Image (cartoon, helix red, strand yellow):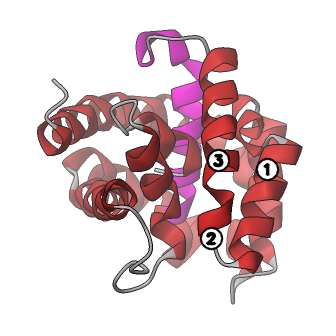
């Protein structure tokens, strides 16, 4: 799961949502000045990632991605699953995407003062450029991978993603549809929000 799914999988709790978003940017123990809800959100993020990585639906799709994308096959599924979440939004999220994104961006803005300056700048950029909307289209998804290219050691393994989506669309969507309800149940148990 990538940014969009982590924001959705937060029981509509602002601190939990922010922590869930911060999970990829927090190594080891969270900073002590973070509120308890944000620390719980970071723990939730790690649980979601761990569950996703070991879920049968993901393990079954990875062999189809590895020949082209190698060790980045898991990253490819994470980003593409946000595309499938957006594509079938009304079946997974009880409010419109417009309302959800507006609330998510406002929540991020509220929490910027807690973050170290470089990280705050990155999240400010996310809000200003409305990064969540890129998951709505294949060209947007390709932009996400283009941004990643400079941060990976084998950028060629992020080539031909449009072809991957075209060839594996049905299998990827099915894997997402098997995974997401299990993640929602996991989050509901974690938060006690069911």
Secondary structure at badge 3 equals helix
Look at mark 1 in the image and give the residue it sits on. 142
Inter-mark Cα distance, 3 to 1: 29 Å
Q: Residues within 10 Å of mark 3 (few under 14, many from 20)?
A: few
Q: Percent position (x, y) of residue 93? A: 45, 18
Could you tell me if residue 164 is visible in this image?
no
Q: Which residue is mark 2?
A: 115
From the viewer's perspective, tell me whether residue 161 is left or right of residue 84. Answer: right
The residue carrying mark 3 is 110
Q: Residues within 10 Å of mark 2 (few under 14, many from 20)?
A: some
* Residue 96: image location, x then y, percent: 60, 11
Asked where in the image residue 146 lies, by quadrant, the reply is bottom right
Magenta-colored span: 75-93
Q: Name the residue located 34 percent from the left edge and 83 percent from the top edge.
A: 29
Residue appearing at x 79%, y 50% in the figure: 142
Residue nearer the viewer, 153 or 7: 7
As drawn, 27 above or below 92: below
Q: Looking at the image, how many numbered discs can be counted on the residues?
A: 3
Q: Is residue 152 magenta?
A: no
Which of labels 3 and 1 is toward the front? 3
Instruction: Tell me which numbered mark, 3 or 1, is placed earlier along the sequence.
Output: 3
Report helix, strand or loop for mark 1: helix
Q: Secondary structure at mark 2?
A: loop
List x then y, in percent, for residue 194: 15, 23
């Amino acid at each position: 799961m990538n940014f969009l799914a982590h924001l959705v999988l937060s029981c509509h709790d602002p601190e939990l949502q922010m922590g869930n978003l911060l999970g990829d940017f927090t190594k080891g123990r969270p900073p002590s000045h973070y509120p308890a809800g944000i620390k719980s959100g970071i723990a939730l993020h790690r649980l979601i990632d761990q569950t996703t990585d070991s879920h049968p639906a993901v393990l079954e799709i990875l062999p189809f991605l590895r020949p082209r994308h190698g060790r980045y096959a898991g990253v490819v599924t994470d980003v593409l699953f946000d595309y499938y979440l957006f594509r079938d939004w009304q079946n997974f999220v009880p409010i419109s995407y417009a309302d959800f994104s507006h609330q998510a961006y406002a929540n991020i803005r509220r929490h910027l003062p807690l973050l170290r300056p470089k990280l705050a700048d990155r999240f400010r950029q996310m809000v200003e450029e409305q990064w969540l909307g890129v998951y709505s289209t294949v060209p947007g998804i390709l932009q996400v991978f283009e941004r990643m290219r400079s941060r990976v050691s084998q950028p060629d393994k992020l080539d031909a993603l449009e072809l991957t989506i075209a060839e594996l669309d049905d299998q990827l969507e099915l894997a997402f549809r098997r995974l997401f309800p299990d993640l929602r149940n996991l989050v509901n148990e974690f938060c006690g929000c069911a």
